[in-house]
Image (cartoon, grey):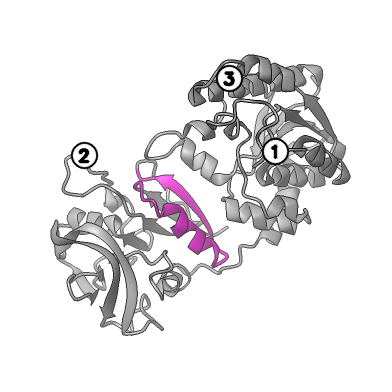
Amino acid sequence: MQKILILDFGSQYTQLIARRVREMNVYCEIVPYNKLPALTPDIQGVILSGSPFSVRWSNALRLDLSLIAGKKPLLGICYGAQLMADFFGGEVGQSEKREYGKVMLQHHAPADPFFIGISKRSQVWMSHSDTILCLPEGFEVLGNSDTIPYAAFRSANGKFAEPVYGIQFHPEVFHSLEGFEILKNFVLGICHCKGDWTAAHFVEGTVESLRQQIGNEKVIMALSGGVDSTVAATLLHRAIGDRLFCFFVDNGLLRKNEFTDVLDSYQHMGLNIEGVDAKERFYAALKGVTNPEEKRKIIGKLFIDIFEEESEAHPDFQWLGQGTIYPDVIRSISVHGPFRHHQKSPQRGRVARKTETEDRGAAPDVVQRRSAACGQGTQYHAQYPEPAPVSGPRPGHPYPGRYYA
């Protein structure tokens, strides 16, 4: 399967870059800048994200770009572009005035595949306080703004086996009016992605893969009531039927009537599922606790305890199913460190007898499309997935039955 690799330097827009790529029906993965995987043949190109850091700082996030340049088409966005300029011998300095907001890009390379079909003057969105003062040897300017001489540039022909592009604006945001087309030129035109990755294809391929992987064995899985674990359970159910055993825990902190509504929906979907009423256990454990972080730890531990109890009550399973969506994986290994609500349980290895199956390649919008492709009702694919322990730690909800949204 073809894919685009996005190296994350901590930008607030990284997930948006990935979403734009997926809107082209191209699969992509986000990994931290310092976790560069092997550049396997299925990786068609690499994108370097922006960053709140400056390449001029002593603690700048750096990467040996010789590991990528020339091996795969490469695009640097904002910080990514400045990192490339700095790495290959150019000069980056502080802007006289911080560039933030709408700017008119003027490109002068209509024949370059990067700007095919793009207006000579096009509105883009800038957000940076550094700027490239001098391009490295072997690079050429493709576009500028009134204040930035190197708003877009590329490696000269023959410099690398594969082209290297850099832009000091953000094509992924809507304020860049032709930004999506610019990204599409890179992903489809320069990286030669086919754009044939769809939710329906994923469902068919995943069901068959799970069927072969699991064979005649059994899977146990906890469901949260959200779209992510529901999609994962549906795929597993299609693959192995009632050999998937699911359970759904009522921790007393769900939305009003959510436990009975969700359990009823799961049963109508044909899932082999059991409801676990653990409200009183959670209430007792949370009594008198007001600190959100302490609540989170208590709730997380109780979920794990209940999972282990269920696994002991059903000892004949060999697999653990988990509906971890892609941003949960990213947040667990983020540039900024793990997000507390999204850390994957370290204890789960004690529960799984053999291994686990995860729907880990999917971001929220993709999970929602897969939900629709699986035929699930809008109550699943129209909602944003939310990890089960998140609702409890929120301040302002100290009493049972008071959390409605």
Which three-letter amino acid code belongs to the residue tagged 1? Arg
Q: Nearer the viewer, mark 2 or mark 3?
A: 3
Q: CA distance from mark 2 to mark 1?
A: 44 Å
Between disc 1 and disc 3, whose residue precedes?
1
Answer left or right for 68 relative to 14.
left
| Mark number, residue 59 | 2
Vertical placement of 118 versus 294: above or below?
below
Q: Which segment is the magenta one?
A: 9-33
**Residue hosting label 1:** 255
Q: Nearer the viewer, mark 2 or mark 1?
A: 1
Which three-letter amino acid code belongs to the residue tagged 3? Ile
Q: Indicate the quadrant where residue 239 lies.
A: top right
Residue drawn where x is 77% and y is 46% of the image: 234
**Residue hosting label 3:** 298
Secondary element type, mark 1: loop
Whether residue 344 is visible: yes
Answer left or right for 352 relative to 195.
right
Callout 2: 10 Å neighbours few (<14), some, many (20+)?
few
Callout 3: 10 Å neighbours few (<14), some, many (20+)?
some
- Residue 326 in percent (x, y) is at 55, 45
Vertical placement of 93 versus 308: above or below?
below
Which three-letter amino acid code belongs to the residue tagged 2? Asn
